Image (spheres, rainbow, N blue to C red):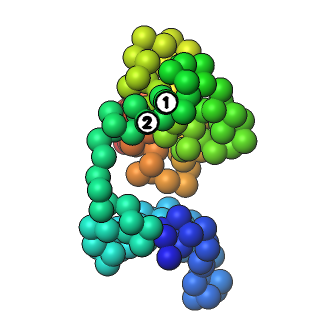
Amino acid sequence: MPLPHILDIGYLPALLRDQPVAVVPYLVCRDDFIARLYHQRTGYWQPDGQGLDPRSQEERATALDLLAGGKAGAFAFAAASLADQGDLALALEILAPGLLRHPDSSELAELRQAVLVRLMEQRQLSDPFGFVVYAELAGAERFPIR
């Protein structure tokens, strides 16, 4: 079963029903733990064939730019639509190759920053690991916790 399907199951152990204080800490590390264990157990190649013929980010960007008709606006439209639907991570995945192919596009750069801020807001209370990664990608200042 592919990792996204496993994560979508949203398993919560029955043991936690009697321990409500432990639910939030469990949820904070659940996805990262499952992903790490999944990659450890599945090895280099994924069930869908991913990993058999690796491609660089630039190669993927070139292929997606063909689909976008060579236009930065197509990347922006797709990413903005995904963000409006609440799929911020996928919007970010569309923006990365768009910016590789169209590095001077202020529209793509501004949309990327807005998506990163929304991802940070989404993760700040429930996923500290994701929050830190998105904050770093956004170039946000992070202050030490006292």
Percent from the top left, x then y, of residue 54?
Answer: 29, 52
Label pair 2/1, CB-CB below 8 angstroms: yes
| Badge 1 amino acid | Leu
Taking the image as shown, residue 81 lies to the left or right of residue 93, namely right
**Is label 2 in a helix, a strand or a loop?**
helix
Residue drawn where x is 32% and y is 33% of the image: 58
Q: CA distance from mark 2 to mark 1?
A: 5 Å
Give the numbered dot on residue 63: 2
Percent from the top left, x then y, of residue 114?
Answer: 57, 26
Q: Number of numbered discs present?
A: 2
Give the numbered dot on residue 89: none
Give the numbered dot on residue 66: 1
Q: Is residue 77 above or below residue 6?
A: above
Percent from the top left, x then y, of residue 61?
Answer: 41, 33
| Badge 2 amino acid | Ala
Q: Is residue 115 above or below residue 56?
A: above
**Is label 1 in a helix, a strand or a loop?**
helix
Taking the image as shown, residue 102 lies to the left or right of residue 110, namely left
Please tell me which residue lies in front, 77 or 71: 71
Please tell me which residue lies in front, 146 or 139: 139
Residue 115 appears anywhere in the view = no
Please tell me which residue lies in front, 69 or 17: 69
